[in-house]
Image: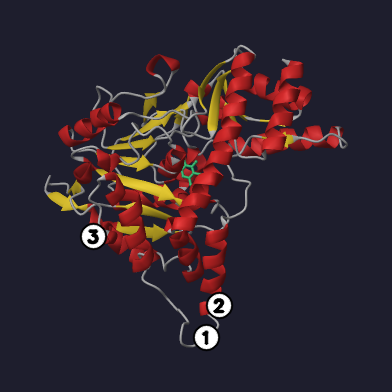
Amino acid sequence: MIKINENYSKLKASYLFSDIAKRVATYQNNNPDNKIIKLGIGDVTKPLPPACLEAFHKGVDDLASEDTFMGYGPEQGYAFLREAVAKNDFASRGCAISADEIFISDGAKCDTGNIQEILSNDCIIAVPDPVYPVYVDTNVMAGRAGTWKDGRYDKLVYLESTNENDFIPAPPDAKVDVIYLCFPNNPTGATATKEQLKLWVDYALKNDALILFDAAYVSFIRDETLPQSIYEIEGARECAIEFRSFSKTAGFTGTRCAYTVVPKECRGFTSNGEKAMLHPLWNRRHCTKFNGVSYPVQRAAEAVYSEQGKKEVKDLIDYYLNNAKIILQEMKKLGYTCYGGENSPYIWIDGKMDSWEFFDLLLNKAEVVTTPGSGFGTCGEGFIRISAFNSVEKVEEAMARIKKVL
Ligand SMILES: *Cc1c(COP(=O)(O)O)cnc(C)c1O
């Protein structure tokens, strides 16, 4: 008899973005002539930077000739890209991360989900609330989350992020084994200081725990005093894995390229309490189940670090940050308490009413799609997330419409 993985039946029935899509489709069917503006799902809208496109094309041309053809590459990624990452994303920030600690992949979503394969099934998992749903659902599938009761999974530890802690949860009193952190945060737009991250690194070292640090939005950090990597904190090489992606940085959401950093000192423990290193485990997992990102895509990603690429990426992010500023200013003017929107593409707004009610109001009256905060967790109730990923013209139009109805 072929038995299924019944953990899947513990997943919450409805998925946030399909709920939103249904409501948008209903509105559109009833009002076919009206033009909806989407400031909902976190996908980029601007094309790839020209430097990346040029390298991408050249990478494709390399495949046309026997002399330059590339077949299977190294599973962990080509040295040219791993070295560019180590130098530009880490050495430049004073972080000692070597090229062979970087694993190139096809997405931070996959990596944040797949990483748990090298961890024991009985680990106690802590997730932020509100949270990027991937961390929770992948743990449900693995059977670590328990069952869904009153809006939460009974075996997860929830790290509540509220206006009382500026959406930066402090370490819990309870002992947990794995901690997911995401800064700049999706959905709240919160950024953590070095002091705040140090509390977590100290906790992880003291409790033999592991931090899974998602820095997918690092390129939005403009405040020079903020840390960009968990490895800027002393001791993090021993207890933290970092995830990064070219998706939001350089518009690679459809192109697919990301990477995971597993330092050689990063440790786990066997069931007898002996230290066991995570780097060889992840290397083994990655090489067994993954065959590398395509060569032209890695060439395109490498171009992010060229002089021209750096300039173009900065302009690209500046463009979205300007949108974020417009949204933040307008919502504040309307009297809403807002968070994020600086060093982040997301604005987290206290709607002063039920999340879905606020979502429906903005959809049906202003024809603007946002994301209800409650979809990201209990602590998101009462909030909506507005995303800066759209053209400045659409953002201005959306804000003008919102102003009229609120
Ligand atoms: C968009 C996003 C990612 C990036 O995922 P990719 O699979 O690399 O496109 C990772 N984490 C968070 C929190 C995100 O919002």
Q: SS of the residue at dot 2?
A: helix
Q: Which mark is residue 280?
A: 3
Total marks placed: 3
Decide: marks 1, 2 in contact (CB < 8 A)? Answer: yes
Q: Give the CA separation, mark 3 to mark 1.
A: 36 Å
Within 8 Å: ligand 1 and the Cβ of disc 3?
no
Q: Nearer the viewer, residue 122 or 371?
A: 371
**Which mark is in front, 3 or 1?**
1
Q: Nearer the viewer, residue 174 or 259?
A: 259
Picture layout, residue 113 above or below residue 350:
below
Question: Which residue carries the number 1 mark?
Answer: 65
Q: Nearer the viewer, residue 77 or 397?
A: 397
Q: Give the CA separation, mark 1 to mark 2.
A: 8 Å
Seen as rendered, the residue at the extreme right is: 33
Q: Amino acid at mark 3?
A: Pro
Q: Position of residue 38 (x, y in %)?
A: 69, 36
Q: Position of residue 333 (x, y in %)?
A: 62, 14
Q: Position of residue 76 (x, y in %)?
A: 35, 64
Residue at image position (44%, 38%) is: 136
Which image quadrant for residue 400? top right
Q: Nearer the viewer, residue 88 or 34?
A: 88
Question: Which residue carries the number 2 mark?
Answer: 61
Q: Within 10 Å of the Cα at label 1, are there few (<14), some (14-19), or many (20+) other Cα atoms? A: few
